[in-house]
Image (cartoon, grey):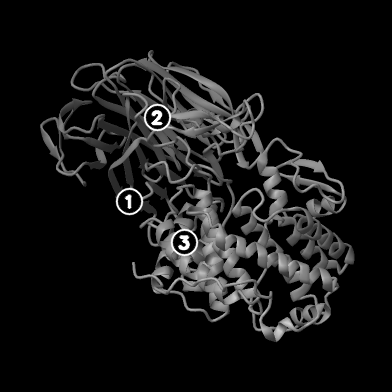
Amino acid sequence: MNVRELRMPTAPQGCAPLLLPQWDRLDDTGLLRHFSSEREARFYPVADPEETRRAKVEAMMDGLFEFNGEAHPLPDPLPWLDNPSDDVEWHILLHKFYYAVGLGMRFAETHDERYVRRWTALIDGWIATTPPGFIATDVTGRRVQNWIYSYYYFVTTAGESPVDAAFHRRLLNSLAEQVDHLCDNLTPARNHRTLELYAIFLASIVFPEMRRAAFWREFSLVRLEQNICSDLLADGVQVELSTDYHQLVLKNYLNVRRLAALNGIPISGETDAALQRALDFCMHAHKPDGIVPSLSDGDARSFRDLLSIGADLYGRDDLRYVASAGSEGTPPAGLLAHFPDSGYTVVRDHWGTGGRRYADAQYLIFDCGPLGAGNHGHFDCLSFELAAFGRSLVVDPGRYTYSEAGDTNWRIRFRGTEAHNTVCVDGHNQTLYLPRPVKQRPGAVKHRVAGPAPDATLHELVEFEDFVLLDGSARSHAYDAVHRRRVLFIDRSYWIVSDWLAAPTRHRYALRFQLGEAAQGHVERARGKAPLLRSPGLLVAQPADPDVRFGLESSWVSYRYGAKLAAPRLCFRATACSFGFDTVLLPFEGGTPPLAVRRIEVDGQRSSRAARASAIAIEGKVAGTRFRDLWFHARAGERASWQFDGYNFQGRWLWLREDGDGRITRVRADTGAHLSYRGLDVALDA
């Protein structure tokens, strides 16, 4: 890719003064007056909504610091080098200074100088006691950003700034020292490197009077444009393959792009093209309720603001449409979005057009890709999340924590295969995950990936107006069972999930579906041999099979770091060499619709869950219309001749719909397939 090809800048030699000559002659008062006046530098603050909540800021004014749902009182001056929590993430947030922006926001609202004094004391205390680079370089990057964002309120836009002039110079000196530390100690790759480079670029824009500003700007821009090429896959998804981290990285890139535009700095066309591909994933990953699910590490939250920024930068009405939940702009072109390099596929039934509510759309995101770079991937190949009618119905559990302290290792529980909407084999993770000693804490361990991720393959992707098929497999290196999963969206109404586990040896298989917290205490099972389960907004059904044992498990979901909610988990178990599960998921609103699923014999033999082919009949009612559908598939995907329910079929898979008189009204099959019924050929649409 032809990115910015500039000579890498070299640092000025020697111990130079902080400011360029024009400003270096100013005393403390003159310097503060200059930075409080109108200047050419254009920038804006960015606030973290959670960390700048008014209640959190006011509690912190009284010495109570709360991060990740855990509060600790801290004395003045703060003991910056000590962590009152068992979780290092708490200490990290203390040093990132998001709350400094909250103090600035409160000062801008009230002009109360108590916020100035608190801001000054916290930063002065940190400068006096904390060595450069304490904890990690990325923490320095976030702190630089947040100090500058808070500076916007206390100095840049404060008019006659109430900040002490001598403190102001100390602040500028510390910022320069920290930015130089970033330049000398950049993280080698991925999201931490991105935020560090953005912090350097931000400092260069806000403080062009500093002697090192030109160096910082060129240093960061060259590497940022290189980083965008290496950090984003060809399909636009960030290499760590976390839906949340993708958005956080994109946020940093877009801030660089906005600052460049505000200050007349050119950016390459290749960079803009890469950012638009990243925005495409951001757009499609948003559920109809405006939340991006947290597949792999991260939180579940909205990033519609990034879509608005992208719409303004690139004049894209599809981004504006999703950013506004369908009230502005034009809908995206398709209902299915596939990202081949990351393995993510997103399917939905509408974009809020045709008189339908935007938030009511059905949505499924399917993960058939690699584990991702770094250490943020979960062991969830072939997992998915499902939403419909404003509810999240089958959900990814989230991450909950990075800490492995305590009697229960929650990090392992939320990251493991067992926690996800896929099949767990013998209780193992899909990827080897082993403890390693922590040198700094004798006796403590931290788990790390110790083996390759499963080989993920998307075999087939088919889309019609009334039928979508996703066919993927995961070949783990931890056991000999190969998992193949087909996900179908039928008539834009309901879903079929067909799982096939092929193995030469006997295994214990556990198919799980994690429901949302709204289902806690509200899962009901209908009477009968066949599993038919009702939770709020969702029916889950399988054909009767004596070899399958069903259980409702206690579990949890986490949408924010450090917070978990009780939520039930459906589990279907079987023990065999090779085995298959066929599950129907019918979202609904209002009254519970009828639904029945039964197994059909194939080739005159009982079509058991261990047979090489499966056929099921689904009878139900959607939007007042009754239907009877047949779904047949060769479980390993081989083409052959098959007989079932009076049909003769040559092919790999088939879906058809019959009316009340048994006449075929719709049919889809793999390319080249042939179907006949009572000696008459049936026209196939695929």
Tag 3, which secondary structure? helix
User: Foreground mark, 1 or 3?
Assistant: 3
Nearest to N terminus: mark 3 or mark 2: 3
Q: Which residue is mark 1?
A: 465
Tag 1, which secondary structure? loop
Q: Which residue is mark 2?
A: 583
Q: Which residue is mark 3?
A: 279
Residue at position x 44%, y 44% from top?
Answer: 364
Tag of residue 540: none
Are there few (<14), some (14-19), or many (20+) residues within 10 Å of tag 2?
Answer: many
**Three-letter amino acid code at the position of disc 1:** Glu
Up-down: is 408 above or below 341? above
**Three-letter amino acid code at the position of disc 3:** Leu
Nearest to N terminus: mark 1 or mark 3: 3
Q: Which of the two residues, 141 or 558, is positioned nearer the viewer here?
A: 141
Q: Are marks 2 and 1 in contact (CB under 8 Å)?
A: no
Up-down: is 597 above or below 400? above
State the image coordinates of residue 7 (x, y, percent, origin top left).
Answer: 43, 74
- What separation in Å lies between label 3 and label 2 (alpha carbons)? 33 Å
Q: Are marks 1 and 3 in contact (CB under 8 Å)?
A: no
Residue 527 placement, left or right of 130? left
Nearest to N terminus: mark 2 or mark 1: 1
Q: Quadrant of residue 536?
A: top right
Q: Which of the two residues, 651 or 574, is positioned nearer the viewer here?
A: 574
Tag 2, which secondary structure? strand
Q: Are marks 3 and 2 in contact (CB under 8 Å)?
A: no
Residue 325 seen in the figure: no
Are there few (<14), some (14-19), or many (20+) residues within 10 Å of tag 3?
Answer: many
State the image coordinates of residue 604 (x, y, percent, origin top left).
Answer: 19, 18
User: Foreground mark, 2 or 1?
Assistant: 2
Up-down: is 3 above or below 181? below
